[in-house]
Amino acid sequence: MGIRVDNAIALYMEAINDGNYVAAINKYTGERYIQHSTPVKDGRDGFIEFFADFVERNPERNIEILRSFEDGQYVFLHALQTLNGGEFRYITADIFDTDEQGRMIEHWDIIEELTDASDSSPSRIDGPTAPDDRDRTAENKALVTSFLNEVLVAGNVDVLADHVSVDEFVQHNPQITGVAAGVYTEVHRVIGCGSFVAALSKVNAGGTELAVVDLFRVNAGRIAEHWDVKEEILPEADWVNSGKF
């Protein structure tokens, strides 16, 4: 798809899946590497420190890249991590910023443990894996941005049908009966490619603040499908970098 998404996938696979985290972080990152995964310190040294322990604790690692795309300098990855023969399973959503050479310079991620059997239909991870309608990227991003701000942040449900397909909509989070769980308070970033649009937001869920990545599939001018990954925002005293956003 492009050098940026290729480098992001290679960083994931070589560092995490294969355990070659030193070589990978040195190969695929630029002059700086700002980290928004709260247990991981900024820079290459912070990455190496975290994954030295991670690899030791998880000797069996299987990473599956479910979906990926580029939007200019930004890359989106949707992945499934299976650790130690299934002892742990995580859904992850990653957004990377890149430099002019396509190397990673900033990273946001949301990680959620997959605790159910995922045998329901639709599951948390199934569905289309590649974007189409690539000539409609700008209008699809505008639709999703409007949906996030007008419906999820402002709470204007009267315009819901202007954004979401009544007949086609597929929800991949079995805990959500509609299109979202919680009150969206901030939308930090929206990136897209064709029919896929991803957004990083802050959500208040019954008094608990979450960082959430929503992935939407747009079809014929309406949101037709939704995946999400959510993570509780820890107290600032527990951060080792500038935080989730």
Image (spheres, rainbow, N blue to C red):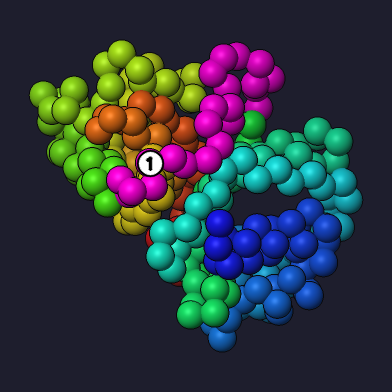
Give the crowd class for mark 1: few <14, some 14-19, many >=20 residues within 10 Å: some
Residue 26: image location, x then y, percent = 71, 79
Q: Which residue is drawn at 47% across and 36% down?
A: 228
Residue 132: name its quadrant.
top left
219 lies above or below 94: above
Residue 174: image location, x then y, percent = 49, 19
Residue 6: image location, x then y, percent = 62, 62
Q: Judge left or right: residue 75 versus residue 87.
A: left
**On the rendered image, what quadrant is the N terminus found in?**
bottom right
Residue furthest to the bottom: 31
Q: Find out whether residue 122 is within the magenta segment.
A: yes
SS majority, magenta: loop
Q: Judge left or right: residue 75 versus residue 120.
A: left
Residue 241: image location, x then y, percent = 51, 70
Q: Is residue 206 visible?
A: no
* Number of numbered callouts drawn: 1
Q: Residue at x 39, y 47 (%)?
A: 134
Q: Which residue is drawn at 43% across and 22% down?
A: 171
216 lies above or below 138: above
**On the rendered image, what quadrant is the C terminus found in?**
bottom left
Q: Give whichever of 86, 147 is nearer the camera.
A: 147
99 lies above or below 39: below
Q: Give whichever of 59, 240 is nearer the camera.
A: 59
Q: Find out whether residue 182 is within the magenta segment.
A: no
Residue position for label 1: 133
Which SS class for mark 1?
loop
Q: Can residue 221 be seen in this view?
A: yes
Residue numbers of the magenta segment: 115-137
Q: Which residue is drawn at 54% across and 27% down?
A: 127
Q: What residue type is labelled 1?
A: Asp
Q: Give whichever of 23, 46 is nearer the camera.
A: 23
Residue 46: name its quadrant.
bottom right
